[in-house]
Every structure is written in C-alpha cells, then in structure tokens.
Image (cartoon, coloured by chain):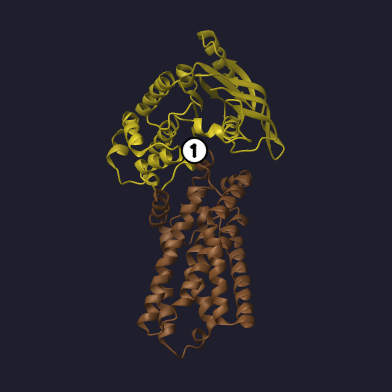
Amino acid sequence: MNDILFEWKLIIRNKRLKQMLIPIPFLIFSFYAMIASSNFIFINYFIGRIFFTIGLISIGGIYYGAISLGMSASYIEKLVTSPKPLSSSLLQAKYYLNSILSFIITITLITIQILNGKVESMEIVASYLFSIGYVYHGMFKCTLLSYAPIDIKATSIYNWQGFTLSNLFFPALFLLATMSIIAIVYWLLGKSITLIIISIVGLCFIVTCKLWINSIGKEIERTKYHRLECFRENNY
Amino acid sequence: MQIEITNISKSFDENTVLNIPQLSINDNELVGIIGNNGAGKTTLFRLCLDLLRADKGNIFIEKEDVSKSESWKTITSSFIDERFLIDFLTPKEYFHFIGNLYNIKRIEIDDRINHFSHLMGNEIMQKKNKYIGQFSKGNKQKIGIIGAMITYPKLLILDEPFNYLDPSSQIIMKELLQNYNHIHGTTILLSSHNLQYVMDICSRVIVLDSGHVIYDEVDLTKANKGKIEQYFLKY
C-alpha cells in the first residue's frame, strides 16, 4: 500500500504527468456522447465498441508504456544500489495503481451505460479484465524495448527530452495486433464466445501478474548497465 | 567491512579512465580519494556500486563480487549525485522511502532523522512540505548524504560530499563524518577536491591521477601531507 501511495504521489505532484491525465475525462465524455447517440455507427458495432472500451480502460497501461521507466529513471541509481529488488514491490505498485485507475474508468463507463438504459456491462467487465491482464502485460513488456524513457523532471509537456518513437511505436503495434486478433476471433466465433475468451485470457494474466512482473524486473536488472548509460546520456 | 579491488579497468571510447591493479580498503577506515577532474574518482565509485560494468577485473565487498551478488547492497549505502534523489518527495518522505528499501521502520527513521538535525539546518527541518526538487543544490546535497547515512550501513560511499555546502555546513559535515566513522564503525569511502578537508578527517588518503593510484598514504604525517600537496602543485 505504501508503494502504491508513493507512485500516486509521484504522478500527482508532477506537472507533466498531471497534464497526461487530462484527456481521460474528455475520452469518457466522448464515450457518453457516442452511446447516447444511437446514430453513431461506430459504437453500434461490437468490434468498434470493444476496441474503444479496451483502449479507454487500458489508457493507464498506455501511460505506463510511455512513462513507467521514466518515472523511475530520475532515481534509478538509488534503486539499483538498494537491497530491495526492482522486480518486487515497486513494479507491482505501478501495476496495481494503473489497475485501480482503470477500475475507476470501468465503473464510470458502466454507470454511463446504465444511465443511458443500454446495459451491456459484460462487454465492459470483459474489457476491464482483458485490459489489466493481457494489455498491461504487453505494455509492461514494451517498456523493456525503450531505453530512453521520457524525463519526468521536465515541467512542461512540450519538453519531452528523451522521448523516442519507440515509446509510441511498440505499444501502438502491440495494440493493433491485439485488436486484429480480437476481430478475427469475433468473426469466427461470435460475440459471446469472444467476450468469454478475452475474460479468461485477462484473468490468466491477472492471476500470474507477480510472475511476469518479476520477470520484467529481472530483465531490467539484466540490462541495467545499458539502461543506466542511456539515462546518463539523456541527462536524467 | 572490506573492499578488494583486483585488476580493475574501465575505458570510455578507448580512453582508459581507470586502471587499478590492486587496492584493499580495510574495516572501519575513513578513506579519502582525491584527484583532479577526470582522475577516475566517480568511475571508481560507480564500479564499486555496480552502476558501471568494468572492462576487466573485479570488486569485492565483504568477499562478494558486486557484479555477481546482491547481498552487499544490504550493508552499503551511497550518494553520488542528484540522480539518487527523488524530486517530487519531501525530505521526510524520501527518508521514509529509503527506510522502506532497507526494511527500516518509519518510527526508527523518524528517530534517526533527529540525529542529523544539526546538518539539515532550519531550511530543511522547518519547510516540511517543500519538495526536494525545490531546494538549493547545497540542501539537496545534505538530503542525499543524510539519506545515505540514515541506514547506518557498514560501507558508506560519498562522492564529493563537501560540494555546494556553505562553510558552516562543510565544518558540520567534517565532524559528522568523523563521528559517524567512530560511533558506527562504518567504513567510509569519500572523494573530494578539497585536499585540506580530506587530509584533516581521513585516516587514509588515496591520490588518483588519470585512473591510476599515485599515492596511498595511511601515515598522514606532516611530511606525507606535504608530499601530496607538492604533487598537486606540479599542475
């Protein structure tokens, strides 16, 4: 719990990270507007709806992909010289915090659906499980591919020193591949089976989260010399 | 707490910045490493803390190879530069965070903070809601050093601890390091550009130049101190 609060403090006290939270209410409002309007074609299709919902719920994970190591980059030398392994509670705290943020978004989306009289909450619940399980796993893995995460010390969103295309490219590629697979499953097996499959896949990754988070932590440790060099070169 | 350095070498872009065939640091020693810019002091510390990969050779802390073991981290604490600080925490939160990394209870950390109140001074002690990033460089330096000392490690590594400090704080720091070494029996490895301070407080002085150990003096007599001063006069 202390570690989760610690991560939250770092987000909420940082001007840049706070700015990155601003689009979330806007996107939720967009969702409300779309499902309120039955004429909006995109949202009337299961695939369109599920893509949008997963994207919205897993936005915490997308942030993670871009900033998670950036958050730690400014004090990484303290972390890697300390006895507490990077793979344990701090990485897990990042995961739990993002999952809590996603849960708040999920509850908001379900409430919006109920208010609109369109109760298809199973879609949102399945999207939540899939997002915080499979999608977050993918996003966490994407962070391993980026050696120069953004600098959280910068006070303006316009000064993204160290931000590389890989911060965006790999998560975008991962999400595109994921959505394509869901579309194929839906096309082959239909809506109900697709929802069950994505729920089960998500649950599997949630249950095993400690395992894969630890393995990511170990990978960061294994490549730490290269990462530390990149952080130093980027003046973190 | 013993440190054994054997045949260590590190190069950047084919420039050898450190080359030490053999160096031992003994229990309870307060060792000062002095040298001009680019002498290899910080590189040596980074290698000791496994923040850099050596091209060849090994560094052992309590007979554990730092690049192959993690156990030395529980008995070692350090402050190299601002990258060891977390800008968006208050000093107290930062000390609690370090306590968490070293499995020290909050109440214990709160108690230990009081032991460093003299060094922290009014600015750090009274502005409790100020984030570390908002402090001056001197105060950041104090917070980082206290953050390293608060764990009561067996080995303390400090890079340029007198940098950015005002004259009063430099004197307090000198006394603090000496007392800390005596009371806790901590082996302290520090680097500095301040020749006089290092010779005043350290029981052993190592002079580095272009990555090589030039002098390694345990017997800091007036003559030996003069010899070290003469060495730097040649530049």
Local secondary structure at mark 1 = loop
Determine the colour of chain B: yellow
Q: In this view, does A223 lie above or below A192?
A: above
Q: Residue type at mark 1: give it.
A: Asp
Image location of residue B53, percent across then percent down = 65, 38
Q: Name the residue under label 1.
A: B81
Q: Which residue is drawn at 52% across and 77% down?
A: A50
Residue furthest toward the right?
B14
The residue located at (58%, 57%) in the rendering is A143
Residue B76 visible (yes or no): no
Q: Mark 1 lies on which chain?
A: B
Question: Does residue B83 appear to the left or right of B123 in the view shown?
Answer: right
Q: Is residue B157 left or right of residue B210?
A: left
Where is residue A210 shown, x and y percent of the image? 53, 53
| Relative image position of residue B215 (x, y in whole percent) | 61, 17
Name the residue rendered at 51%, 88% in the picture.
A41
Relative depth, front residue between B173 and B184? B184
Where is residue A132? Give x, y as percent: 50, 64
- Give the color of chain A as drawn: brown
Relative placement, left or right, of B74 versus A28 is: right
Above or below, comparing residue A92 to residue A58 in the picture: above
Is residue A130 positioned above or below B24 on the image?
A: below
Quadrant where the image shows the C terminus of chain B: top right
Q: Which of A136 and B132 is in front in this view?
A: A136
